[in-house]
Amino acid sequence: MIHKYNLLERFLFPAVFLNKEMLRSSLQGKTILITGASSGIGEQLAYLLKDIHVQMILVARREEKLLSMKDEIEAAAAKVSVFGADLRNKAEMEDLLAFIHKLPDGLDLVVNNAGLSIRRSIFHSLDRYHDFTRTMAINYFAPVQLLLSVIPLLEKKQGQIINVSTINVMLQPFPNWAAYQASKSAFDTWFRSAAPELHARGISTTSIYLPLVKTPMILPTTAYEKMPAMCPNHVAKIICKTIYTKRKRYQPWWVIFGQLASVFCRGILERVIEISLSKRGK
């Protein structure tokens, strides 16, 4: 699905020039693993690569959706292997890793895109410890386990890891985002910490910090309906460009202003919350 930008969104999210020949040259004959591939960014990325002779391994919980994507993509040039798995499930993760290690041509590229977002007040989470365990499971523990297993494969092919992250990790922590922001920040820190060691072994790393994106993950939050948001297809083009440029980091041009605003707004929010709670206490 391609989201048509309004005037503000066109200003915030400038168009990406994608050199398709350079992309094709960089990926020809390679094997790519995409997690969270059944919708949103992962789905759009898979479709963008369909005209290139690559082997894609598409991973998501909705296997039936992946199978329909496989039929459409293989009508073009790419080959697709589908793996239905919930990466929070130990047995399913182990099955996926076993499958990857049996690939005859190894692994060249991992796009870590699977994730879970939760926006909830801490006072609405007092009996919902699972909010924190499940976000950490998919946003932190799953990609760590996956990468620890496949790093030797990537080293052999001098491959690349692309992590789809969020600008939230670059901002001051905000109320209602404790579970999500903590889990995404945890993996971002892990990935940036590991990056110099990976580079020394010939593995490229890319961190892509995104604002709001029009994916199914944001649908439960009605407050997002009228907010500026990136199109998943736009993000997929950004990912494709980092494949051949090997750019280490992408972030919106305006994120520095967002960082300053987050510091200012956090103080206001804290004061509003304090006033609200004090009134309830009277």
Image (cartoon, helix red, strand yellow):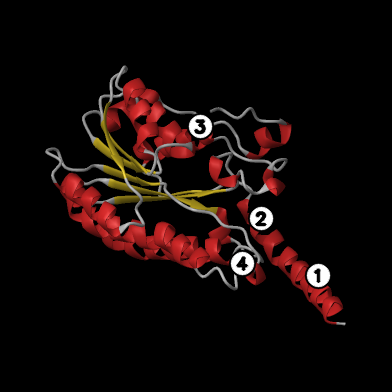
Q: Earlier in the sequence, mark 1 or mark 4?
A: 4
In the image, what residue type sits under mark 4?
Answer: Pro
In the image, what residue type sits under mark 1?
Answer: Val
Residues at marks 3 and 1, CA–CA distance in whole angstroms: 38 Å
Q: Earlier in the sequence, mark 2 or mark 3?
A: 3
Asked whether the residues under the numbered discs 1 and 4 touch, taking CB atoms below 8 Å apart as contact, a structural biologist would say no
Tell me the residue at 42%/46% (across/down): 113
Q: Which residue is mark 4?
A: 173
Q: Which quadrant of the figure has residue 159?
A: top left
240 on left or right of 153: right
Q: Which residue is mark 1?
A: 272
| Residue 147, position as x, y percentages in the image | 28, 56
Residue 233 circle label: 3
- For numbered disc 2, what is the local secondary structure? helix
| Residue 190, position as x, y percentages in the image | 38, 65
In the image, what residue type sits under mark 2?
Answer: Gly
Q: Which residue is mark 2?
A: 258
Residues at marks 1 and 4, CA–CA distance in whole angstroms: 16 Å
Residues at marks 2 and 3, CA–CA distance in whole angstroms: 23 Å
Q: Earlier in the sequence, mark 1 or mark 2?
A: 2
Residues at marks 4 and 2, CA–CA distance in whole angstroms: 12 Å
Residue 199 visible within the image: no
User: Is 139 placed above or below 162 here?
Assistant: below
Decide: few, some or many residues near mark 4? Use Cα within 10 Å; few <14, some 14-19, many ≥20.
some
